[in-house]
Amino acid sequence: MKKYAEIVAAIRAVDKTVESDAKARLDSLTKPVGSLGILEDCAWRYAAARGELRARVRKPCMLTFAGDHGVADEGVSAYPQEVTPQMVANFARGGAAINVLCRDASADLKVIDMGTAIPCRFPGVIDHRLGAGTANIAKGPAMTRLQAETAIEAGAAEAGIAINDGATLLGTGDMGIANTTPSAALYSVLLGIDPEWVAGRGTGIDDARLAHKISVIRNAISVNCPDASDPLGVLAALGGFEIAGICGAILGAASEQIPIVVDGFISGAAALVAMRIRPDVADYCFFSHLSAESGHVAAISAMGIRPLLNLNLRLGEGTGAALAFHLIRAANAILNEMATFSDAGVSTADKQE
Amino acid sequence: MKKYAEIVAAIRAVDKTVESDAKARLDSLTKPVGSLGILEDCAWRYAAARGELRARVRKPCMLTFAGDHGVADEGVSAYPQEVTPQMVANFARGGAAINVLCRDASADLKVIDMGTAIPCRFPGVIDHRLGAGTANIAKGPAMTRLQAETAIEAGAAEAGIAINDGATLLGTGDMGIANTTPSAALYSVLLGIDPEWVAGRGTGIDDARLAHKISVIRNAISVNCPDASDPLGVLAALGGFEIAGICGAILGAASEQIPIVVDGFISGAAALVAMRIRPDVADYCFFSHLSAESGHVAAISAMGIRPLLNLNLRLGEGTGAALAFHLIRAANAILNEMATFSDAGVSTADKQE
């Protein structure tokens, strides 16, 4: 398994020459310049990240990381913690939304237990357990700095295995009861936004529990005194095992020049950590959707990102990323398969003649 | 070929019992209630339109209608009229964006010449020509009422053929230089919106030509004196052959209880006419995307519709609808393939216990 420092050091800027070539090719295709909008952006961003003009999307693979959270003890979620392994069992049997959407997108799905309270010993579930859930962030750090590095290394290793198996597009997803709480804490500290603006209802808590959740996040930040300029330290203090695994998958994908589709609220917090660790990571990320989780809009705006989809999803698991696979693959097909004006003998706009 | 009156008379309301059953099934699936947002809406709307809870999306088929417009003589487009048949030739050879996106979505594509200035005698292009383009709406009606009915019958017939061939989801697309002008005129009259708010830059005209386009639309409305309560008359006065064909495909699909995905600005104008002819049509339509054509936001808001995608597309051809096929198919898979809480033995939210 590659070490944390090695993974981070391997990340370089995307290829600006390929980016220009891809934009030029898009402008030569039989359509008014720019008329495929954000699909065109996806096409050149994919090529630039791969460092190859005609690189194709092959064998997309979703990496869904599961973990539990000590902060669930504070009563911040509508669901009991036993749901985490129950849902992982559902993933293992193929009955969850993420299974359906990955099959529908012809994508592989890998489910990784990063540390649920009850171990997920189900067929096909990959074991990278770092403990029986994190410690309660309202009382101290979620994990040690070494655990955060180890979780990142595990996530990057799983990304690497998928890439070795032929995946040229990855996606991230999460499962972990209470994990909107650590995610909101990460956004709050790294973006300098009050917890009130990034905390939301998760799987469906009421007003009273939302107010309580906000105060729990405030406590967690005040107890841990995180230093925003040390993203790994912030992740260790306030994150989660599955969040660190997602962060590792993103860093690992970027280190191998493979684009990665980031799901919603939880994956976005992991991506934010990864981008703070190494800003070049941003150009390898596709942000799939604006979550209905109310804090996401504030977080994503502060990050300066416009997600591809806005479908009021708030499920996690990687469901938004799986839907966005379709768009990235379509964009990639446009760049590679459309005829140019000269191929097709089509007249260009009169003002350009 | 079924007659206009017969097509319209066959359209009935979607099945509200199936709608309730589909919503109940969605709520029983292993996810927090409503957490798949608009994807869930697509799932129950599809089932209700089909009148069958477990109806599946099979063999999606895109119907792309081409036509030319006398109003192109007024200089309202950035492209010369010869581009219409050139692009249809590109469709016939498989090199256009709609070909790529239909292949990518495993969808069939049918291209129908409803009346281009130069006939589109290319392999595979279906001939329903009603003339060498419409008359110039700035000087009088685009077509006769009989032509509008005939175009609708042709569009419905092509929808019917696709449905007989096994399609359980259709899409609409357009090709026709200058066709944002008649579309804007239709929106303006049927929605009571000033032409200034629904006219846009089409394939890319400058400020001066946009101002001219708005005045052409005003003239067209004043010359034709359309009666907004007579949608077929408005279509004949201000529409286009391909717009009438799209309107017919929508009416035809609804008459056979097959949902249809409406592309952007031009297809939306055709859908508006169809919904004014028979309001029940609305429940068979999926509006695929908010176009970058600047008038679309005003039109779609006035129609009370929230499109599925917002990707700054402004190409037409059915490209937005082809992308939305992925979402409808994914939604349909969710309803049909996910496990329920009782199947999976997953605990429900504690507040519900």
Image (spheres, coloured by chain):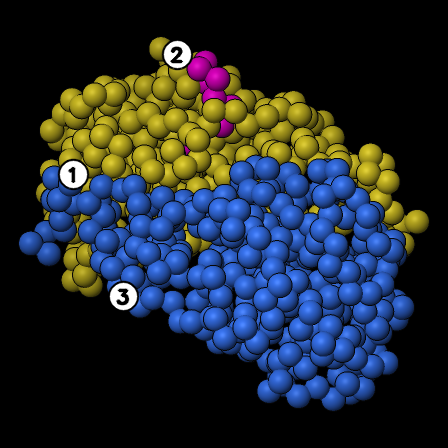
Chain colours: A yellow, B blue
Q: What x and y, as percent, mark residue B341?
A: 16, 45
Image quadrant containing the N terminus of chain B? bottom right
User: Callout 3: residue from which chain?
Assistant: B
Q: Residue at x 50, y 43 (%)?
A: B59
Q: Is residue B206 left or right of residue B249?
A: right
User: Callout 1: residue from which chain?
Assistant: B
Q: Residue furthest left?
A: B353
Q: Residue at x 38, y 34 (%)?
A: A102
Labels 1 and 3 in the same subunit: yes
Residue A68 visible, this orientation: no
Whole-angstrom CA distance, mark 2 to mark 3, is 56 Å
Image quadrant containing the C terminus of chain B? bottom left
The residue to which callout 3 is attached is: B17
Q: Is residue B48 left or right of residue B249?
A: left
Q: Is residue B33 left or right of residue B66?
A: left
Residue B44 visible, this orientation: yes
Labels 2 and 1 in the same subunit: no
Q: Residue at x 23, y 28 (%)?
A: A92
